Image (cartoon, rainbow, N blue to C red):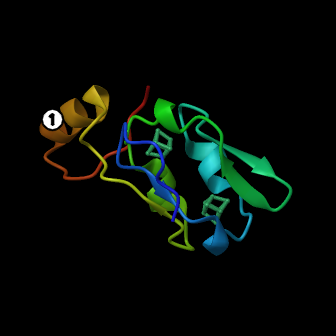
Amino acid sequence: MLNAYAVNTLIYDPALCNGCALCVAVCPHAVFEMDGRKAVLVRPSACMECGACQKNCIMNAIAVESGVGCASAMIRAALTGKKEVSCDC
Ligand code: SF4
Ligand code: SF4
């Protein structure tokens, strides 16, 4: 597991990555990029903990405590009554 960045709860295990690139597609802050057939954390400190990457990673290579760092997601969660929402920032 890779979590050398003590600024948020994002944890990524590249050993589990199958290269689907969904995390790259859904991340609103370009935290991941593809390097060949593996996702790479390129801007980990930019993660706002929206949870979109974790939800879309079928390999469970990503863990993040969503909703704790993104104001937009927290507001949407409060308005919709849902526990987990993706941010739109
Ligand atoms: S969504 Fe998961 S399996 Fe797909 S590229 Fe990202 S980390 Fe790898
Ligand atoms: S939790 Fe959201 S902001 Fe953070 S890496 Fe995943 S998709 Fe990007």
The crowd level at tag 1 (other Cα within 10 Å; few <14, some 14-19, many 20+) is few
Count all numbered tags in the image, as a single digit. Answer: 1
- Toward the right, the furthest residue is 36
- Residue for point 56% across, 65% down: 13
Vertical relation: 59 (above or below) 67: below
Label 1 element class: helix
Task: Give amino acid for label 1.
Answer: Leu
Please tell me which residue is depicted at 46% across the width and 53% down the height of the picture.
Answer: 3
Residue under numbered circle 1? 79
Q: Position of residue 11 (x, y in %)?
A: 45, 56
Q: Position of residue 33 (x, y in %)?
A: 71, 44
Between residue 37 and residue 77, name the one nearer to us. 37
Q: Is residue 23 left or right of residue 64?
A: right
Quadrant containing ligand 1 = bottom right
Quarter of image, res 74: top left
Please indicate whether residue 43 sits to the left or right of residue 20 in the image. Answer: left
Quarter the C terminus occupies: top left
Q: Residue at x 72, y 63 (%)?
A: 20
Q: Is residue 67 left or right of residue 42?
A: left
Percent from the top left, x then y, of residue 48?
39, 34
Q: Is mark 1 within 8 Å of ligand 2?
A: no
Closer to us: 77 or 23: 23
Residue 27 rendering spot, x and y as whole percentages: 55, 40
Q: Residue 1, relative to residue 30: is it above or below?
A: below
